[in-house]
Amino acid sequence: MENLKIVAPVRSKFMMEEMIEAGANEIYFGVSTPLFQQLSFDNKFQTVADYPAHFSDWEEIDDIIALAKANNLRVIFMANTPYIPTGFEKDYQKHVYRALEKGVDAITISSIQSCHLLNSLEKNIQIISGSQLAPVNKYGAELLKESGVKRITLSQSMTLEEIYELRDLEMELMITGNFGTGSMAGNCRLWESPNNLEIGEGIRTLYRVLSPLNTHSNQQHFLDSATDCSLCNLEDLVSAGVTAIKFLGREAPNPVTLAMVVNMFNEWREMGISGLTIDQKMKITEQEQLMWVMKWVPRFCEKCRCTYKPTAITKTYI
Amino acid sequence: MKTPVKELRIHHDYLFTLSDEVLDSYQIVSFGHSGCHYKMVGLEDQHIQFLLERDKKVKIEMPILFEASMKRFIAEMQRFFHYELNLIVNDWGTMRYLAQQSLPPNISLSVGRQLIFSYGNCPWYEDILQYEEQATKEQFLQLNIVNPSMIRFMKENGVTEIDVDINIYLENSVQLLRDEGIKVNGFLNYPLVSTSRSCHTLRLYAEQIGKCQHLCNSGILIEPRERWNRFEDTTIKISREGREKIGNLIIYGNIVVQDMKKLNESIPFEVDSLCDDARFSPILLKEEAIN
């Protein structure tokens, strides 16, 4: 448990300070490019539901890197666009090179194309593969290793047993701690629109059924197979070889609330190091964290949104 | 769209129900599933032999294979490897595994639609790209694999063909791939938009996994009503205009397709073959597929 790293999103100095306070060991961010209005060289549109998801000024990055170094944090730069049109390949390389010059420690990519482009740029880049490129089997992970990837983000719908099968590959394994997509990340094209507040992630939209069905309700989140929480399985994940947990939310409307989520995981990690059981952890959290009672339990526990426990969602995994 | 070759992709259960008239309309027939290995239970030599005896080319689409099912699935499939077959893979790990097995020369590899996409595959791509410059839009509407490193990567792994949901913007991508010697098998209707490991149909009916194949023979048509907010866990209503922009979807098990049919004539360029997918569409095999 001591080696389990907490990887937190950052889009401003304020957000970074919150994440340091919450116990993050690593931070990640992206920088927008003036080449695009809403697209980017990472896997986030420049705004999501009207909130920015990036730094827009490279000068700010100097402060962020300095603050990270002062706090002993590793810095990850997001360059995880799922593909790069050939006309933008050189711009992509320049974008990443600029981040490397600023002193980032690792680059997250989400395509084999990006791996090849970065390997031709510099040999010693620490490459992390993002969730869009998450392997679903050992051969996929080996392929990424051969391509120069040092850490892989695992598919959210991979089971603990399957993760365990990857532990001998000598790669770092990272899971996503919060907010599942509900589909296999690289196999969903129902993206949230940055330009329209009515178009969210299609996979978690509420739908009405138009086919004749004998169901209790004709309005449901039919495509929602997301899993949202792995708190109760931190020890199991570490046993399976997981070394890092990444939190989503660069675009979070309230960085303070997101930092509380990061802090919750940090507290549970610390309690795990002290040898506390899940029941003990829950009892302490219930006494100390209002968010646990008000938000966490009703939203995740009562709705069975567990990523690594048998639920209606995980029991229907193919 | 001009194309000399037509392919029919069906569940193997339906093969022996096809009329000669329907079967005669296709030079290639393919089985399999891009997301579920349970749906392939019952695929036997007799299905393949039936087609080979009628001079059809045969393909088998392999699903995304998670670690837990991969070894057993591949072992099951190997009994077909003495036939002249094209195998369609839908995850890079499976492609890598097969490429390392020194496959016999009668087996060729395709990459499936789970791995081939562009922004044009999002039903509301026009909304997403609306403020980008025209030249940028056109580039992001090209396929994710149309670049030197991905073409080299696929060739190194023995890939000779791809499946792709065709749209009007793909002329450059298709041309470039064909120039590189990679064949393009186009799908015109009901484009694939999402795949989940957890089966949507199975969750809905709460049936036993593995004995559920009958549940997804027909699609479930759904209409968007409310947008979900990730951080607040709340929803807001989608207006009629928004609903029209998003469009309806159809669920087939763990596969979701866009409810959209295009006319052949709407695509002004050629592909190597054109596929009617009767698995994930309401296409009526006896009537529409032969047009």
Image (spheres, helix red, strand yellow):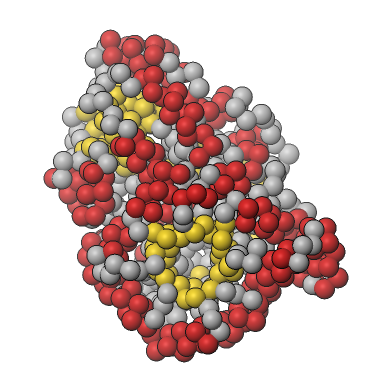
Write the residue at 76% across / 70% down: A291
| Residue at figure coordinates x 47%, y 88% from the top left | A66
Q: Quadrant of residue B129?
A: bottom left
User: Can residue A223 be seen?
Assistant: no
For the N terminus of chain A, the quadrant is: bottom right
Q: Nearer the viewer, residue A54 or A211?
A: A54
Looking at the image, which residue is at 35% across and 77% down?
A100
Q: Is residue A287 visible?
A: yes
Q: Percent from the top left, x then y, of residue A213?
A: 64, 33
Left or right: residue A315 versus residue A53 is: right
Viewer-proximal residue among A279 and A82: A279
Q: Residue furthest left?
A: B179
Say how many tags the image has: 0
> Which residue: 57% across, 47% down?
A164
Query: Which of A51/B144 is in front?
Result: B144
In this rendering, the answer to whether A161 lies above or below B108 is: below
* Place of residue A269 in the rendered image (x, y in percent of width and height, measured from the top left): 69, 66
B182 up-or-down from A70: above or below? above
Q: Identify whether A170 is placed above or below B182.
A: below
Q: Which quadrant: the C terminus of chain A?
A: top right
Give how far across and how far down residue B71 sits, in percent: 47, 32
